[in-house]
Amino acid sequence: MRTRPRRHPLHKSVLMTAMVLIAAGTLSGCSATPAPSPSDTPKPVAAATAAPTATPPVFTTSDEALAAAEAAYSTYLAAGDRAGAIGSESWNSYLSLTTGSELAGVVAAREDLVSRGRALTGTTSFDSMTLQSSSATPGATWEIHTYVCIDVSGSTMIDAAGRSVSTPDRQVRWPMVVVFVTSSSHSNQLLVSESRVWSGSNFCSP
């Protein structure tokens, strides 16, 4: 049975991933990662490993790491919905939840929308988040790799006149790889560092 979707207000960069960046060819696949198990079977995950220092690990179990990733992603989606114009306080608060390539991608996606007179409206959801790996990095921060299904069936892209420009036969469920990192070696705050479409078979059921 598929986990009930977590509904959140529309998250702009996720929809850009599914609706715009794929067509533009700006997203890379995850060919180096083993394909996730089918959604109706148990998914093997890597156990959280101890940090290579005397500092106790931030996440001591896989379940704890997954719960933290789900909570961080929920916060991230909500902040994306509240984000106003580029440079606004809400926009900067949203960016503070990202780092690395995700930060750059979020900014580029918004700039692309604005330049083309496009906007996004509606709701999106995510479900079936599973843990691929959780481990300490050489810099003593923590990194979590997850698989997640993004559902954009409740969202649409509109033009400056408010008309929908989304195609009716578009794919609405996308298999994604989302990577989180802790903000420091002593913090359990997770930042989204990367989001990319899974390049293998679609593990998200219709």
Image (cartoon, grey):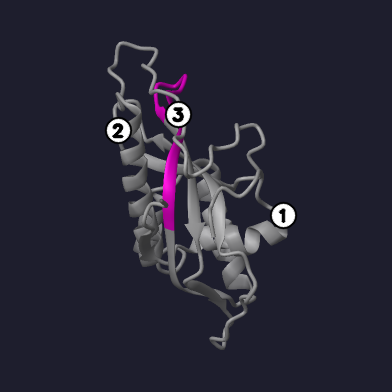
Note whether 110 is above or below 183 in the view shown: below
Q: What type is the residue that disc 2 sits on?
A: Glu
Give the Cα distance between marks 1 and 3.
Answer: 30 Å
Is residue 13 in view? no
Residue corresponding to mark 3: 45
Identify the residue at horizontal 43%, vertical 56% (top origin): 126
Quadrant for the C terminus, please: bottom right
Q: What type is the residue that disc 1 sits on?
A: Gly
Write down the region rendered in magenta.
Answer: 126-142
Q: Nearer the viewer, mark 2 or mark 3?
A: 3
Q: Earlier in the sequence, mark 1 or mark 2?
A: 1
Counting from the top left corner in percent of width and height, residue 20 is at 63, 63
By secondary structure, the bulk of the magenta-drawn segment is best described as strand
Residue 101 is a magenta residue: no
Secondary structure under badge 3? loop
Q: Nearer the viewer, mark 1 or mark 2?
A: 2
Q: Residue 64 carries which label?
A: 2
Note whether 72 is above or below 46 in the view shown: below
Counting from the top left corner in percent of width and height, residue 111 is at 58, 64
Give the Cα distance between marks 1 and 2.
Answer: 35 Å
96 and 41: which one is in front? 41
Secondary structure under badge 2? helix
Identify the residue at horizontal 36%, vertical 63% (top origin): 8
How many neighbours does mark 1 have within 10 angstroms: few (below 14), some (14-19), or many (20 or more)? few
Kindly indicate the quadrant of the structure image that contains residue 22: bottom right
